[in-house]
Image (spheres, coloured by chain):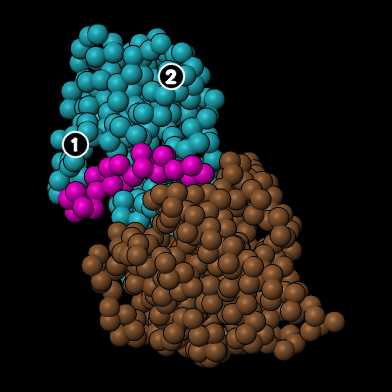
Amino acid sequence: MIQTVTRPHREHIVRWAEQRPEVLVLSADLTSSCEADLFRDAYPERFFSLGMAEQNMMGFAAGLAREGFSPYIHTFAVFVTRRPYDQVAMSIAYPNLPVRLVGFLPGITTPGGVTHQAIDDVGLMRLIPNMTILESGDATDVESVLDVAQAVDGPVYIRQLRGEVPRLFPADEPMRLGEARRLAEGDDLCVISSGICTEEALRATTALRQRGLGVRHLHVSTLKPFDDPRIAQALADVRLGVVTMENHSIIGGLGSAVAELMAEQAIGRRLIRLGLKDTYAHGASRPYLMREYGLDAPALVRAAETLAGKALGVGEDDLSAVRLGTLSAAEKTEDL
Amino acid sequence: MPAASDGPRPDADRVRLVADAVRRRVLDYTLKNNGGYLSQACSSAELLATLYLRVMRLGESTAPLVPQPFAGVPAPDNPNAFTGADYNGPRAPDLDRFIFSPVHYALVLYSLLIELGRLGPNGLDAFNQDGSTVELIGAEHSPGHEVTAGSLGQALSQAGGIALARKLRGETGRVWVFMSDGEFQEGQTWEALAALAHHRIGNLGIVVDTNAQQCDGAMADVMTIEPLAERIRAFGAEVREVDGHDSDALAAAADLLPAGGGGERPLVVIARTDPCRGIDLMRTRAPKLHYVRFASEEEFATYERLLATWNAAAADQAKADTEIGA
């Protein structure tokens, strides 16, 4: 069975920051909700409560970064990317300051409804020059994304996971900047997934492979810059087409980045973008919303059938029978 | 140039002479550009001159007398990007920092830097020219500027972060923020004041050019911010209200922010100013004072004559000073 890690960020940032006295955490009244409470208790002199005032928090972070500190802002993704957009763009990103914006509750991972669901955050942050964008898809990503962010010369937006997080990738295979994880090799279909969609994609790709379809699967954690040569190679190598799968609007995020890459590199394949199809979501459970908006394994099966031009005979039972374990390198995927 | 606190502190007469020269130069460039932010020089000349001459402890400029051209926007792959902070001297634990918020006042600051010798007499040759850093609305690469502030209300929060960092490091230098009163319509300004008070950031002083004017006209008509002193005081800052053209009063109020970093509360000096001070003929334009565009050749000539009068008086004064000196 797949291993689940409870609140990996909460413990990890305490360990990680121990020998990094320059690391500060800034919070806007969502400290426990963003798993920063252990950091607050461990290092109260490095924790700053800025209240429900995100615009000002961005400016404070910018000033602290100019003075050599490494501020890690913790709040919900919507309150990093929508409400203080001008402050992020002007106070932080224009001067290329090393502020780390850790945004929680990406996409439909919250039942909090439209006000809490960041369905456009990747698009908004991609538009900002100097901004690097990272997204965690499992506990190993969560535990290594801070190392990746800290090494970046400039601002970083982190789409972070909280709570019960699956461990899909071995703990000793950390996230690396600009390197997609190759989860499966195949020549028929290319699946590119990010964030929580990767776990869903794995259920579908396993079943699709059992039906004889060669599926190349990549998990993307660096959404900007989007220049990993193995992505372009994977897009060009497959016969039938490409499916992107993201917990975000199909406009502006992973699907758009792949489309831009395909157009610029003249990779003439069909592309199906799975994600929120230019719509808001609403307050409901994650499985319900993933089903409703086509972010789940059956949605990927349907996309594969469209590209293959035929029914593949994968039913709900086949998908629910898939047993996921922690994945290693692509060559081990035959064991799934 | 010695740091402000080394040697005798310049007096109000010196501030008046510098402020007059600033108004002359801003009028000159407003005529050359057939428009400009002229009323801002009228309201803030004494205020900015007092900050630089009598309040802030700054080191000598380490920047070139003639500003460098634009070197590209800050980016990981651009090592050449710079800010204009070097005109305010080096960073040092005991020295003050200056954060300039309403960057449409840029020409006032450039003119002041020339009078102080921090910019050369030719420092404005590239003013408002393509490819120059001496821009009409200042950017962080413009002389005397340090942060990106043109989206008004953002500089105070950035200055708060700088002041907090300096407090954490135990530095004794202060952070001074020059603001315009219109910025107190932005919600972020009040967020910043709340945070400064909550975190007991007492090494930060704000001086507000309260000229009661904004782009659309009189602030009282657009969206009042009064009673400003009571409002800011209620947010937990130390507040003083002074005549913004009275250098002694400004300096005395600013001195309430303790040097050495022992303060517990930010200081706000509300400097009540006259947007037409020194140029009475501008009063006919009220309430449209934000950006002066000359409506006719006749009006242009009127302002040209004023500048000629001022220049002649300044020349006479210089001659008299030389004779006294001889």
Q: Disc 2 marks which amino acid? A: Met
The picture's colour for chain B is brown
Q: Earlier in the sequence, mark 2 or mark 1?
A: 2
Left or right relative to A285: residue A233? right
A59 to B258, vertically: above or below: above
Give A78 or B217, whichever is nearer the viewer.
Answer: B217
Q: Residue at x 28, y 47 (%)?
A: A118
Q: Is residue A128 magenta?
A: yes
Residue B291's x, y, as percent? 41, 57
Residue on which disc 2 sits: A262
Which residue bears the numbered disc 1? A279
Q: Quadrant of residue B322?
A: bottom right
Magenta region, residue range: A102-131
Tell me the cyan chain.
A
Q: Which is more toward the observer, A319 or B124? A: B124
Structural distance between the alpha carbons of marks 2 and 1: 25 Å
Q: Measuring 25% from the left and 20% from the top, which residue is drawn there? A: A303
Is A210 located above or below residue B174 in the figure? Answer: above
